[in-house]
Image (cartoon, rainbow, N blue to C red):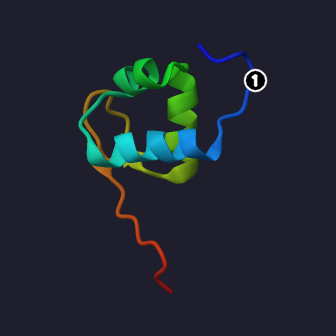
Amino acid sequence: MRGKGRSFMDSEIARIVSLLTSTDMSITDIAKRMRCSVSAVNSVNRRMKVREYAGRRTSWETVERRFGSA
């Protein structure tokens, strides 16, 4: 488990975002794989706006991401 208050490296954030966008893994499974807390993965998800749960715990919609568009 990561140390309390320890920041993610950019590569770790990119990996979490990748897992959120390209897999059906749960937040809990991603946290286990990344060896961090569920709340840390949730924080990345909220900040990067990857998945929208709309009050549901087990289902989500992937937010459409447009990189480089104006």
Q: Nearer the viewer, residue 68 or 48?
A: 68
For residue 13, side relative to residue 29 (left or right): right
Instruction: Give the secondary structure at mark 1.
Output: loop
Tell me if residue 68 can be seen: yes
* Outermost residue toward the top in this view: 1
Q: What residue sits 51% from the left and 33% below the top? A: 42
Disc 1 crowd rating (10 Å Cα; few below 14, some 14-19, many 20+) is: few
Q: Nearer the viewer, residue 14 or 58?
A: 14
Q: Which residue is mark 1?
A: 5
Q: What residue sits 51% from the left and 31% below the top? A: 41
Quadrant in the rendering for residue 20: top left
Query: Could you tell me residue 51's position as x and y percent?
Result: 38, 46
Quadrant in the rendering for residue 55: top left
Tell me if residue 52 can be seen: no
- Locate the N terminus and report the quarter of the image it occupies: top right
* Outermost residue toward the bottom in this view: 70
- Against 64, is 27 above or below? above
Query: Could you tell me residue 34's position as x and y percent?
Result: 48, 25
Q: Nearer the viewer, residue 56 or 62?
A: 62
- Against 28, is 65 above or below? below
Badge count: 1
Q: What residue sits 51% from the left and 19% below the top? A: 35
- Against 56, is 47 above or below? below
Q: Which amino acid lies under the numbered mark 1 shown in the image of this protein?
A: Gly
Query: Could you tell me residue 63's position as x and y percent?
Result: 36, 57
Q: Nearer the viewer, residue 10 or 48?
A: 10
